[in-house]
Amino acid sequence: QRFACVDFDFVVSDFNMPGMNGTDFLKIVKEIQPLTIRMMLSASADFNTIMGAVNEAEVFRYVPKPWLLDDLRDIFGQAGVHHDQMLEDKRLADELRSQKNALTPQEKEARELEDL
């Protein structure tokens, strides 16, 4: 069976889930879609839980429960800005790689000499 691949701007996970914790889930999301903004919700204030999520799954924000709706709106707004910046950075990097690949060998050598 073929599965459609859908790009997600954001994925929000709770830390405590049946069968898998949120950090492990968001690490998988990171592998599949590295430009997806990952956020975690949890009632736990355990430092190791928070640091594991930040370091291993590279979560954008760790949102403690209970949250205030206005705070959550602000976090999603910040996440949207961050996502747009990541996409623009990727576009510029791709454009630069494309330009570098379009250079003749002589132009590449000249640029390398200029860099030195």
Image (cartoon, helix red, strand yellow):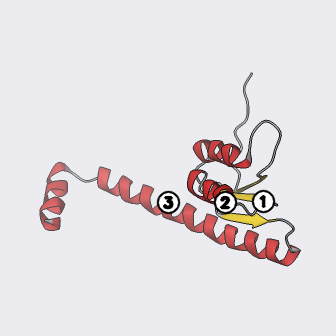
Crowd band around label 3 with a 10 angstrom C-alpha radius: few (<14), some (14–19), many (20+): few
The dot on residue 44 is 1
User: What amino acid is labelled 1 in the image?
Assistant: Ser
| In the image: residue 24, left or right of residue 16 | left
Q: Is residue 34 above or below residue 79?
A: above
Indicate the position of residue 81 as horizontal and vertical percent values.
65, 71
Would you name the residue on which mark 3 appears?
91
Residue 77: quarter of image: bottom right
User: What amino acid is labelled 3 in the image?
Assistant: Arg
The dot on residue 50 is 2
Q: Is residue 56 above or below residue 96?
A: above
Residue at image point 61% right, 42% down: 32
Residue at image point 78% right, 66% down: 64
The residues bearing labels 2 and 3 have C-alpha atoms spaced at a distance of 31 Å
Crowd band around label 2 with a 10 angstrom C-alpha radius: few (<14), some (14–19), many (20+): many
Q: Nearer the viewer, mark 3 or mark 1?
A: 1
- Give the position of the N terminus as an image quadrant: top right
The residues bearing labels 1 and 2 have C-alpha atoms spaced at a distance of 8 Å
Q: Are marks 1 and 2 in contact (CB under 8 Å)?
A: yes
Indicate the position of residue 5 as horizontal and vertical percent values.
69, 39
| In the image: residue 85, left or right of residue 73 | left
